[in-house]
Image (spheres, helix red, strand yellow):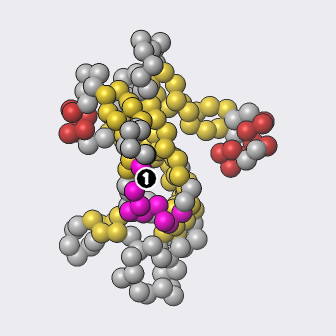
């Protein structure tokens, strides 16, 4: 979970996390997945019901995010040094390091082992389908994990904003 206080920015990689087991099993042993689109939401656990509910859009603003989907048997994410040119152009917000993909072995073919998804469309990204035109997809071999680094801004002034029902 992301735990923040009003006006705090959360921008850190959440590390390697497994994809759901049914996805891992379905695409194991060299099977290919065609990613044609995706949809996401920000959720929290409701204290009274124990169920996932959407975080009110007035509580948290997702400025942008980077997500990697990968076959961790053949690729990994590593910290790389940003070049002076990258910093000058504002890439990675001028940070000295960034996460980048590295193949663990020389590939036998051109099938990708890692994909990066990055969006900067703010709160509007929630429950908005991000898809490719018919006939297009991002292909990946045997994906088993992902890594997300959201730039999340806490916009919920708990002192003055008492209406938590607007989503």
Instruction: State left or right for residue 29 relative to residue 122.
Output: left
Name the residue carrying label 1: 130
Instruction: State left or right for residue 68 relative to residue 153.
Output: left
Instruction: State left or right for residue 156 relative to residue 88.
Output: left
- The answer to whether residue 130 is seen in the rendering is yes
Residue 77 x, y percent position in the rendering:
50, 32
- Point 41% across, 11% down: residue: 108
For the N terminus, the image quarter is bottom left
- Point 25% across, 22% down: residue: 29
The residue carrying pointer 1 sits among few (fewer than 14), some (14 to 19) or many (20 or more) residues within 10 Å by Cα, namely: few
Instruction: State left or right for residue 22 relative to residue 101.
Output: left
The answer to whether residue 81 is above or below residue 65 is above
- Point 38% across, 38% down: residue: 135
Residue 16 x, y percent position in the rendering:
41, 38
Element at badge 1?
Answer: strand
For the C terminus, the image quarter is bottom left
| Most foreground residue, 95 or 136 | 136
- Point 76% across, 44% down: residue: 89
- The answer to whether residue 16 is seen in the rendering is no
The answer to whether residue 108 is above or below residue 53 is above
29 drawn magenta: no
Residue 39 x, y percent position in the rendering:
37, 55
What residue range appears in magenta?
Answer: 122-131
124 drawn magenta: yes
Q: Quadrant of residue 87?
A: top right
Residue 164 x, y percent position in the rendering:
39, 82
| Most foreground residue, 36 or 120 | 36
């Amino acid at each position: 979970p992301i735990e923040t206080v009003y006006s705090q920015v959360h921008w850190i990689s959440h590390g390697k996390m497994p994809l759901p087991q049914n996805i891992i099993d379905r695409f194991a042993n060299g099977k290919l997945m065609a990613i044609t689109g995706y949809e996401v939401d920000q959720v929290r656990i409701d204290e009274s019901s124990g169920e996932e509910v959407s975080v009110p859009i007035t509580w948290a603003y997702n400025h942008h995010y980077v997500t990697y989907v990968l076959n961790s048997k053949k690729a990994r994410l590593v910290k790389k040094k940003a070049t002076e040119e990258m910093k000058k152009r504002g890439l990675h917000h001028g940070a000295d390091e960034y996460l980048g993909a590295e193949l663990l072995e020389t590939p036998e073919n051109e099938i990708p082992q890692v994909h990066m998804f990055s969006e900067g469309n703010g709160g509007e990204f929630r429950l908005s389908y991000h898809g490719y035109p018919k006939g297009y997809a991002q292909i990946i071999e045997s994906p088993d994990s992902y890594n997300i680094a959201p730039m999340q801004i806490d916009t919920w002034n708990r002192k003055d904003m008492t209406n938590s029902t607007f989503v």
